[in-house]
Amino acid sequence: MIGAPHKGLLLSHAAGQPADHVIPDATIAPRALRLFRGAPPWMPSDGVAMVVEVTSSKPHKDRVAKRHGYARSGIPLHLLVDRDKSTVPLFSEPEGEDYLNTHIAPFGKPLPLPAPFSFDLETADFL
């Protein structure tokens, strides 16, 4: 896996939904796909394995609007570091406008990441 911080993604757009151009805090894809090499500033989301967001001054956008856009585009995993709630939700199994599963770890507890990652994300440093 290889990550690209602040890589612009083009998402599937739906009428009345948030803009189809977003910049996740991190975009992660299999190295073998070479998605980032020579990619335009706004690249398609096809092949992206996971996006990571850290809540900002607009937490509703990070918690809801972007999550729906990522699900709509079929990005398999969306990890949110929610600084206000001191939790790390992992959204998986996108279907339609949202993800079917959510696993939440409080800061300080490990969060198991499924394949292709298959390791526990340590969150103790988030405290």
Image: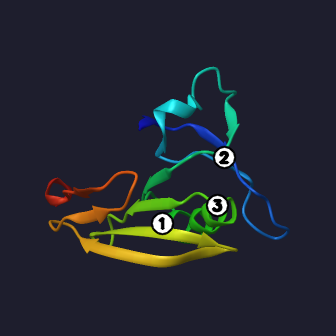
Q: CA distance from mark 3 to mark 1?
A: 22 Å
- In the picture provided, is 107 more to the left or to the right than 102? left
Residue in the picture at 26% in, 65% down: 111
Q: Are marks 2 and 1 in contact (CB under 8 Å)?
A: no
Q: Position of residue 26 (x, y in %)?
A: 46, 44
Residue marked by disc 2: 46
Label 2: few (<14), some (14–19) or many (≥20) C-alpha neighbours in 10 Å: some
Q: CA distance from mark 2 to mark 1?
A: 26 Å
What amino acid does circle 2 point to? Asp
Q: Position of residue 53 (x, y in %)?
A: 45, 55
Q: Secondary structure at mark 3?
A: loop
Question: Of the residues under marks 2 and 1, which one precedes in the sequence?
Answer: 2
What amino acid does circle 3 point to? Gly
Residue marked by disc 1: 59
Q: Position of residue 93 (x, y in %)?
A: 54, 70
Label 1: few (<14), some (14–19) or many (≥20) C-alpha neighbours in 10 Å: some
Q: Secondary structure at mark 2?
A: loop
Depicted 77 relative to depicted 101: above or below: above
Residue marked by disc 3: 74
Q: Secondary structure at mark 1?
A: helix
Label 3: few (<14), some (14–19) or many (≥20) C-alpha neighbours in 10 Å: many
Question: Of the residues under marks 3 and 1, which one precedes in the sequence?
Answer: 1
Q: Position of residue 40 (x, y in %)?
A: 70, 27
